[in-house]
Image: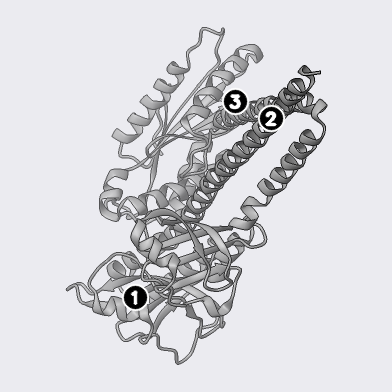
């Protein structure tokens, strides 16, 4: 009789300790899960801001690259009627290639139109009052300028102006070259991102001027954000940072990640609602709490429930590990597939080497002939020295498109960037004569581009090419032999005066 109360008490104490322990463990786990979830979402918003910054920087850089070419044309060729006519064709072509651009324009020192990319020439318009025009007129900097958003006087669209100064020969102000990007182009990209119902995205100049925002409000374009908590956080934390900020527009508390563009004076902000971030965690926590209450009421199921929770945790961790392993496998696969040259769009050196070895083996099995054309841009170093590396990259892109259009006609043919300004075309089932004929077509196609080159006697960029073909008798044939023979023919073409095609076995000059 005396032992029963003691056993009951011990049981009550044991159950109480177990229940309190379960509650404490559950509360601790929930808090840690909350902290982990917040850290993960902080990384997610930071990655989102990085992607936004890179996208905006890339689009502005494309526009700026075009402006560099425009300024070089105006300053070197002048602005006579013939030059302006050619410039308008150039602007229209660039607009067709870059759909994100609303227009390309050139103004003289008084703000009058000199040339633009539109088919209909605007009448009686002067842009000397625009912020970007005043900036270049008052500043001698040759760097690009990202201006405050403007409303087009011809189309009524909201635009982001990207501009560069044009100088006279004596260095005085000669006008402005302008590219305009539609504000809704950035908005469309923002709309493609998943930020929940209450998230927000923004693109802002470093002086506090809003470019665009999601959710979009026309009244926000051009708004001064210097007094906002977001801008103050950006100014205090530097080019990259994260902060919880309650929006002055809608009162929503958001996790904000901001990042400056790599090359231009703008920054982006990616914001996710803290309430939406924690919503999955709240749902999970409520379920856990309900489980703990059930475990407290059903004492006999405490141990079983605890085991199930551990099993669930182990299963979740195992699934996370499997997901991580699957992601690593996918990244490995993507790296394996990354065999395209990022500048020219042709196959890269790695793809060329793999394909060459495979085609030599195939040629041995089929007793067929394998031809190789080695191509080099004539005097390309001088081209870079004269026009700059940005123009050199654009030149290689044009040449790459021309080579691909002429050479890659059959499924087995491969056009690749071998290295620097040197290209290679691999032609299975092709003899020397056919390869020489194709090399001549490539050479003529590049000549027809008429890319200006002041260091060349004819004034245009040209190619030299060396050709070799072999019919390997067995698998001991080396890819190095084919490359060296074609390269030797290329060297012969160079020494014979460039702008010609030579075959290794029987050199011929074109």
Q: Residue furthest bottom?
A: 124
Disc on the earlier residue, 1 or 2: 1
Q: Quadrant of residue 499?
A: top left
Pointer 3 local density, CA inside 10 Å: few below 14, some 14–19, many at least 20: many
What scheme was used to colour the molecule?
Answer: one colour
Separation (CA) of disc 1 from disc 2: 60 Å
Q: Nearer the viewer, mark 1 or mark 3?
A: 1
Q: Is disc 1 surrounded by few (<14), some (14 to 19) or many (20+) residues within 10 Å? A: many
**Of callouts 1 and 3, which one flags the residue occurring earlier in the amino acid sequence?**
1
Q: Nearer the viewer, residue 41 or 499?
A: 41
Sequence-earlier tag: 2 or 3: 2
Side of 283 where 253 appears, left or right? left
Distance CA(mark 2)–CA(mark 3): 52 Å
Q: Is residue 386 above or below residue 481?
A: below
Q: On the image, numbered disc 3 is attached to which residue?
A: 428
- Expressed as whole percent of the image width and height from the top left, the position of residue 484 reads 39, 21
Do we see residue 133 in this rendering? Answer: yes
Residue carrying label 1: 176
Residue 210 spot, x, y in % from top left: 46, 72
In this rendering, is residue 282 above or below 63? above
Q: Secondary structure at mark 2?
A: helix
- Say left or right for 216 vs 295: left
Q: Residue drawn 44% across and 67% down?
A: 229
Q: Which residue is mark 2?
A: 316
Percent x, y of residue 167 = 25, 73
In three-dimensional space, the C-alpha distance between marks 1 and 3, rounded to whole angstroms, equals: 51 Å
Q: Residue furthest front?
A: 2
């Amino acid at each position: 009789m005396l032992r029963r109360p003691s056993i009951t008490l011990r049981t009550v104490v044991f159950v109480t300790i177990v229940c309190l322990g379960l509650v404490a463990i559950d509360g601790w786990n929930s808090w840690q899960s909350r902290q982990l979830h917040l850290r993960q979402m902080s990384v997610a918003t930071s990655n989102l801001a990085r992607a936004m910054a890179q996208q905006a920087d890339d689009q502005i850089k494309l526009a700026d690259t075009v402006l560099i070419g425009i300024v070089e044309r105006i300053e070197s060729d002048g602005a006579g009627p013939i030059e302006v006519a050619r410039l308008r064709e150039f602007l229209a072509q660039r607009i067709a290639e870059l759909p994100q651009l609303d227009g390309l324009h050139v103004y003289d020192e008084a703000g009058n139109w000199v040339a633009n990319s539109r088919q209909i020439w605007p009448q009686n318009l002067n842009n000397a009052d625009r912020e970007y025009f005043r900036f270049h007129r008052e500043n001698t900097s040759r760097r690009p300028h990202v201006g405050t958003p403007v409303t087009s006087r011809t189309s009524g669209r909201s635009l982001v102006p990207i501009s560069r100064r044009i100088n006279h020969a004596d260095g005085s102000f000669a006008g402005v070259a302008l590219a305009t990007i539609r504000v809704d182009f950035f908005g469309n990209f923002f709309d493609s991102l998943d930020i929940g119902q209450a998230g927000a995205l923004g693109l802002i100049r470093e002086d506090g001027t809003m470019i665009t925002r999601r959710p979009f409000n026309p009244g926000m374009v051009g708004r001064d954000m210097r007094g906002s908590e977001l801008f103050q956080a950006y100014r205090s934390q530097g080019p990259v940072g994260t902060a919880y900020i309650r929006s002055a527009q809608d009162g929503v508390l958001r996790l904000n990640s901001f990042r400056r563009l790599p090359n231009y004076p703008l920054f982006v902000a990616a914001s996710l609602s803290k309430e939406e971030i924690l919503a999955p965690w709240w749902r999970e926590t409520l379920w856990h709490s309900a489980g703990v209450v059930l475990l407290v009421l059903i004492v006999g199921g405490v141990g079983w429930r605890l085991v199930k929770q551990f099993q669930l945790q182990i299963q979740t961790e195992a699934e996370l590990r499997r997901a991580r392993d699957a992601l690593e496998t996918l990244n490995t696969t993507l790296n394996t597939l990354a065999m395209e040259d990022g500048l020219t769009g042709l196959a890269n050196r790695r793809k060329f080497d793999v394909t060459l070895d495979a085609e030599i083996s195939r040629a041995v099995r089929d007793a067929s002939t394998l031809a190789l054309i080695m191509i080099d841009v004539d005097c390309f170093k001088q081209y870079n020295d004269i026009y700059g590396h940005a123009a050199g990259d654009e030149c290689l892109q044009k040449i790459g498109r021309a080579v691909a259009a002429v050479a890659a006609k059959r499924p087995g043919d491969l056009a690749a960037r071998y290295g620097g300004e040197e290209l290679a075309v691999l032609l299975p089932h092709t003899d020397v004569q056919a390869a020489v004929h194709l090399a001549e077509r490539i050479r003529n196609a590049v000549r027809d581009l008429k890319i200006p080159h002041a260091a060349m006697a004819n004034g245009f960029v040209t190619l030299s090419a060396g050709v070799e073909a072999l019919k390997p008798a067995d698998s001991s044939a080396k890819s190095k032999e084919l490359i060296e023979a074609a390269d030797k023919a290329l060297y012969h073409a160079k020494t014979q005066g460039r702008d010609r095609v030579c075959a290794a076995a029987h050199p011929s000059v074109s």
